[in-house]
């Protein structure tokens, strides 16, 4: 089994950030509040959508939600709120998406255990994240150990064999066993991860962003950046379309966000989709993938694409060399024939 550390091409100021969502989410909420947003601790239930006739006169959307006052055990209070526009940022099981009949997506299940490991073992993960590939950890994705400041997250995901997720998780834990020995599980998390955008992402004055829209990249399973970025792009489209709140927006204003999003990120999604199809489907193909990662040019292209979120423009000569090396790797791992057969089905 091959193993590579991918950091050779990183410049001193470049890094891959790891976050604890409970810390990041609280930070974002507080920052929004400090900048004038009214934060409500509530559970959105449904919304009344203006009828077509009413839409022309820009009747408000009515949101129904349960507000919680923060007291423990509180059952909450049913309330309504009238709004001009709605940005559905409510994740993979989005009720806003259901309200506008946005359609479904194929999804993966991701499973993760947050494990507090002894301090001397944590030193190893201080500046390092691990990814494992192989049929044991996932038939179509990867297993990981990501550092989370004072503990690690050990997890895996799959689209094709969701019922076996616990078996894959045990294998991932097993791969890391010496390094997490003596660890204590402090939290278990499992959640769907969208595989592609929903058929509909905008209707009237309602737009979906983040996982609600289906913006997780294949191959890496990255969704946090894209959730934040799509939220920002959508908000900017509303600010611009409403001329800073002076006039009501309409669907065409929200569609500008979609156009910008698709233009900016469609190539990244497509490239990662193809990479996943070629390299994540069998152990020989994964071996080829790991072998290729030894190449400095591959590392540079991978990190540039990851860090700057665009399909990095390459050097034609190096691209040619990469193509030849890729084919060499695949042939060596006897994966090419089988993968081509799968792709042509
Ligand atoms: C185990 C696991 C590991 C992952 N690891 C990574 C990783 O390493 N890097 C990465 O980039 N991505 C990762 N992802 C994907 C990433 O978590 C998501 O893509 C990202 O969180 C999407 O952000 P979001 O704000 O759109 O949705 P979410 O983070 O799901 O946030 C949705 C929010 O809406 C709230 N909400 C939902 N329904 C309602 C309702 N009815 N009323 C009110 N509020 C509601 C939720 O409470 C939540 O706060 C991982 C996912 C999983 C499951």
Image (tube, helix red, strand yellow):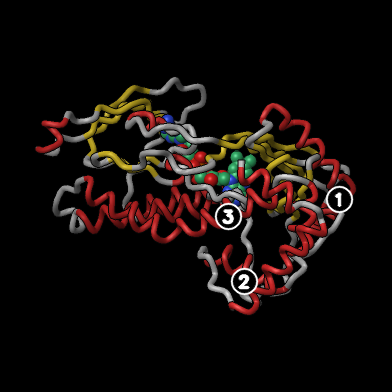
In-front residue for pair 285/226: 285
The residue at 38%/50% (across/down) is: 33
In-front residue for pair 318/65: 318
**Looking at the picture, how far across and down is residue 210, in whole percent?**
45, 46
The residue at 60%/48% (across/down) is: 221
- What residue is pinned by disc 1? 179
Question: Is tag 2's residue or tag 3's residue first in the polypeptide sequence?
Answer: 2
**Looking at the picture, how far across and down is residue 226, in whole percent?**
48, 53
- What residue is pinned by disc 2? 14
Which mark is in front, 2 or 3?
3
Question: Is tag 2's residue or tag 1's residue first in the polypeptide sequence?
Answer: 2
The residue at 80%/54% (across/down) is: 287
Element marked by disc 3: helix
Whether residue 293 is visible? yes
Q: Quadrant of the C terminus?
A: top right
User: Is residue 102 positioned above or below 248 on the image?
Assistant: above
Relative horizontal placement of residue 310, taking residue 42 as reference (left or right) = right
Element marked by disc 2: loop
Q: Which mark is residue 272?
A: 3
Which mark is in front, 3 or 1?
3
Q: Give residue 192's quadrant in the image.
A: top right
């Amino acid at each position: 089994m091959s193993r590579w550390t991918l950091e050779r091409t990183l410049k001193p100021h470049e890094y891959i950030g790891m976050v604890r969502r409970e810390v990041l989410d609280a930070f974002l909420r507080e920052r929004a509040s400090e900048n004038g947003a009214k934060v409500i601790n509530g559970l959105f239930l449904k919304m009344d959508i203006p009828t077509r006739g009413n839409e022309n006169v820009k009747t408000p959307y009515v949101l129904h939600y349960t507000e919680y006052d923060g007291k423990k055990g509180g059952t909450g209070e049913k309330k309504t709120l009238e709004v001009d526009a709605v940005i559905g940022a409510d994740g993979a099981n989005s009720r806003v998406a259901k309200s506008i009949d946005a359609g479904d997506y194929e999804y993966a299940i991701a499973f993760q255990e947050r494990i507090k490991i002894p301090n001397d073992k944590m030193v190893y993960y201080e500046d390092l994240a691990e990814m494992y590939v192989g049929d044991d950890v996932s038939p179509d994705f990867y297993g990981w150990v990501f550092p989370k400041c004072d503990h690690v997250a050990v997890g895996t995901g799959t689209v094709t064999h969701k019922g076996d997720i616990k078996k894959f998780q045990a294998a991932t834990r097993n791969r890391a066993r010496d390094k997490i020995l003596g660890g204590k599980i402090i939290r278990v998390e499992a959640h769907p991860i969208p595989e592609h955008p929903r058929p509909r992402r905008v209707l009237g004055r309602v737009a979906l962003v983040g996982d609600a829209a289906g913006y997780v990249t294949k191959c890496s399973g990255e969704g946090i950046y894209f959730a934040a970025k799509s939220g920002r792009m959508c908000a900017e489209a509303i600010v611009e379309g409403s001329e800073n709140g002076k006039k009501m927006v309409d669907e065409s204003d929200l569609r500008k966000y979609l156009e910008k999003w698709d233009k900016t990120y469609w190539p990244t999604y497509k490239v990662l989709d193809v990479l996943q199809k070629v390299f994540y489907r069998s152990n020989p193909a994964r071996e080829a993938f790991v072998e290729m990662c030894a190449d400095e040019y591959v590392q540079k292209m991978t990190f540039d694409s990851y860090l700057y979120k665009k399909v990095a423009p390459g050097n034609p000569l190096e691209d040619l060399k990469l193509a030849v090396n890729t084919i060499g790797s695949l042939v060596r791992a006897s994966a090419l024939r089988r993968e081509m057969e799968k792709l042509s089905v």
